[in-house]
Amino acid sequence: MAKVAIIGGRGKMGRMFARAFRKQGHTVLVASRSTKLTPAQAAAKGDLVIITVPIRDTVNVIKKIGKHVRKGAILTDFTSVKVRPCKAMKKYSKASVVGSHPVFGPSVGLKNQHFVLCPVRGSHAWYKQALKKMGLRVSTMTPEAHDRHMAIVQCLSHLSNFSFAHAMKQLKYNPNKEVLTSPIYRVKLGIVRRALDTDADLYTDIETENPYAKQVAKAFKKATDTLEQAIREEDKKGIKRIILQCQKHFGKLKQDMREKINRLAGFL
Ligand SMILES: NC(=O)c1ccc[n+]([C@@H]2O[C@H](COP(=O)([O-])OP(=O)(O)OC[C@H]3O[C@@H](n4cnc5c(N)ncnc54)[C@H](OP(=O)(O)O)[C@@H]3O)[C@@H](O)[C@H]2O)c1
């Protein structure tokens, strides 16, 4: 059994994975700014060292503890962006390095959730096995491919949620008062409300620390500007053309997905 040092182990993700590693019989050492065991001491002891601190602090923590991680150990981080932390882990340590991203939050269980690994240096075989034993669906990709993909999965989807909420605020429309709503609107509202319920610092960091976020935000602005102009000019042909182009790009919604969304809409 291994020693797993979790820097930020008292946080939401840290606690969840501390439990999962303990369940497999590993010894878990937890360190943060408020623990007696310092992050450097924990890093020196771990066979696996996980850094799970806020995104904005991750590279600084890597700089501080990287040199303490043993050469034979595995160093990883749980941050939702991968290019910058992976580069830093490679530069500031001599350990095996693999970036990690649990693509889910603490409110869902581990089973069947997606977990991305970005191998940088050396072997991380037993760590990958441990993750699979937790019931996680583990994928491997480069840090660049991860961040490019997450710029869509996270940056674009959060951006559209927050723009939706911000527009309502600007319109002084109170989403809590209205009773006359459609089923699909209730699904959308539920998604936006859930996004707003999450840690604002985390979402701010996701939008600013993903190197591909700016490119995605620019495309989003261009898309909304085009639609705004078409609506302003009452350009029916233009609006319909955009919808048809998107329908073609997305393809047909699979029957089982359509049923799931309809069921959810009916349920809400
Ligand atoms: N929450 C999610 O939905 C989610 C999902 C996927 C990935 N992630 C990633 O997981 C990481 C942690 O997120 P979280 O939501 O678990 O955060 P969190 O609940 O805020 O926990 C962060 C932990 O880091 C510690 N910490 C903060 N600054 C530190 C520093 N300079 N040195 C050492 N420890 C420090 C804090 O403890 P002290 O205050 O005691 O230092 C705290 O225990 C983030 O990088 C995030 O991108 C989060």
Image: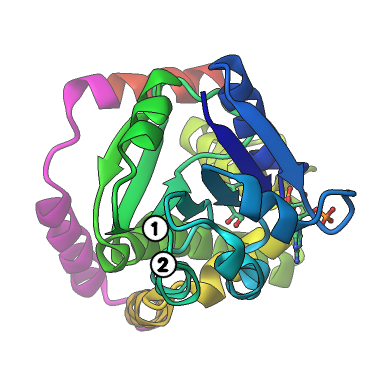
Q: Relative to the observer, which residue lies in front, 123 or 84?
A: 123
**Amino acid type shown at disc 2:** Cys
Given residues 12 and 240, the one toward you in this image is 12
The prevailing secondary structure element of the residues shown in magenta is helix
* Mark pair 1, 2: CA separation: 8 Å
Residue in the picture at 58% in, 73% down: 59
Under circle 2, the secondary element is helix
* Residue 74 at x, y percent in the picture: 44, 49
Where is residue 47 drawn, in percent x and y? 52, 42
Query: Can residue 251 be found in the magenta stretch?
Result: yes
Rendered image quadrant of residue 29: top right
In the image: residue 38, left or right of residue 93: right
The answer to whether residue 11 is visible is: no
User: On the image, which quarter does residue 43 sit in?
Assistant: bottom right
Q: Is mark 1 within 8 Å of ligand 1?
A: no
The amino acid type found where label 1 is placed reads Val
Residue 97 numbered mark, or none:
1
Left or right, 63 with reference to 258 = right
Residue tagged 2:
86
Q: Which residues are magenta?
A: 229-257
Q: Nearer the viewer, mark 1 or mark 2?
A: 1
Q: Nearer the viewer, residue 244 or 155?
A: 155
On screen, residue 116 above or below 18: below
User: Measuring 60% from the left and 75% from the top, which residue is drawn there?
Assistant: 63
Q: Position of residue 160 (x, y in %)?
A: 49, 62
Are the residues tagged 1 and 2 within 8 Å (C-beta)? yes
Residue 37 is covered by the magenta coloring: no
Residue 150 visible within the image = yes
